[in-house]
Image: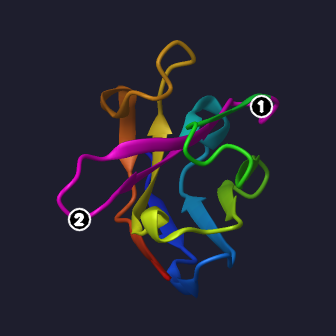
Amino acid sequence: QVQLVESGGGLVQAGGSLRLSCAASGRTFSRYIMGWFRQALGKEREFVAAISRSGGTTYYADSVKGRVTISRDNAKNTVNLQMNSLKPEDTAVYYCAAGGSIYSYTDKDKYDYWGQGTQVTVSS
């Protein structure tokens, strides 16, 4: 079992940056593909980014590509999401997830564990 706790959300102006962190419990962190998803008010949860077990491969949604970087530290059981050039449309609750599949890393139903989410609000 893995427990995930996100942090780092907040209010930022358009064009600003935020760094989200996700701390995982348990000794099996490195076995999981890790992903970040987001859910805006009234919308479905959508894929943002994912990273392979070793951290050597990353995947991004087209909407954030070039502005967002996902990274992980298996020694510290953490996964981070650096977000730059933020836009008002990035406003959402951001969730960290563990599990996934390299064949369907964008599919939220393939992830087994979820954090409680952290709010990101980007003002125009």
Location of residue 36 in the rendering, given as x and y in whole percent from the top left corner: 51, 48
Q: Is residue 117 above or below residue 10?
A: above
Identify the secondary structure beneath mark 2: loop
Q: Residue at x 69, y 30 (%)?
A: 53
The count of marks equals: 2
Location of residue 65 in the rendering, given as x and y in whole percent from the top left corner: 67, 43
Q: Is residue 37 magenta?
A: yes
Identify the secondary structure beneath mark 1: loop
Q: Can you tell which quarter of the image residue 23 is in?
A: bottom right
Spatial CA distance of label 2 from label 1 is 33 Å
Q: Is residue 94 above or below residue 98?
A: below
Q: Amino acid at mark 2?
A: Leu
Viewer-nearest of discs 2 and 1: 2
Instruction: Tell me if label 2 and label 1 are in contact, CB under 8 Å.
Output: no
Q: Can you tell which quarter of the image residue 121 is in?
A: bottom left
Quarter of the figure with the N terminus: top left
Where does the magenta region start and end? 35-56
Location of residue 70 in the rendering, given as x and y in whole percent from the top left corner: 70, 49
Q: Label for residue 121? A: none
Per the image, the residue denoted by label 1 is 54
Q: Is residue 47 left or right of residue 42?
A: right
Q: Residue at x 68, y 30 (%)?
A: 52
Q: Is residue 40 magenta?
A: yes
User: Considering depth in this image, is 101 or 82 the residue closer to the camera?
Assistant: 82
**10 Å crowding of disc 1: few (<14), some (14-19), many (20+):** few
User: Considering depth in this image, is 26 or 69 the residue closer to the camera?
Assistant: 69
Choose the circle earlier in sequence order: 2 or 1: 2
User: Considering depth in this image, is 39 or 50 the residue closer to the camera?
Assistant: 39
User: Considering depth in this image, is 7 or 119 the residue closer to the camera?
Assistant: 119
Q: Amino acid at mark 1?
A: Ser
Q: Is residue 37 above or below residue 31?
A: below
Q: Label for residue 41? A: 2
